[in-house]
Image (cartoon, rainbow, N blue to C red):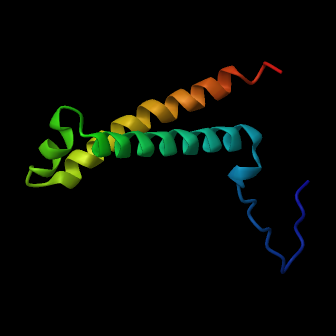
Amino acid sequence: MPDKTPGQQRMPQRFDALRTPLFRLLAINLAVGVAAATLLVGGLLALNPFGLRDLIFADNSPGIALGLLLFGFIVTLGSTAMGSAIMGIGKR
């Protein structure tokens, strides 16, 4: 039976996502995947394989090309890190 005390309003319960262990596990591993993707794109730009850096920066809008490249690596490496964390839950 709900408490119907006059003058008091019930505070809505906030979903604190970082207290949920599974969400915290996924968020940490997503951050690891984002860091790895950023390092990989930075390494590709530093090494300039097959003139990739020159090709990107010769474009009229290099930010879009870098953003798309980084987004692709983040999706790939972030989901890989999250998936391997989920599959490793049962192992000790």
Which percent across, then down, holds residue 8? 84, 76
Q: Nearer the viewer, residue 45 or 33?
A: 45
Q: Which of 82 and 5 is in front in this view?
A: 82
Dividing the picture into quarters, in which one does residue 60 lie?
bottom left
Which percent across, then down, holds residue 68? 27, 42
* Left or right of residue 3, residue 68 in this image: left
* Left or right of residue 60, residue 17 in this image: right
Which percent across, then down, holds residue 76? 43, 30
Dividing the picture into quarters, in which one does residue 32 lie?
top right
34 versus 16 height, above or below: above
Q: Which of 25 and 34 is in front in this view?
A: 34
At horizontal 50% and vertical 35% (from top left) the residue drawn is: 78
For this orientation, the residue located farthest to the bottom is 7
At horizontal 42% and vertical 46% (from top left) the residue drawn is: 38
Which percent across, then down, holds residue 79? 51, 31
* Left or right of residue 4, residue 38 in this image: left
- Quadrant where the C terminus is found in the figure: top right
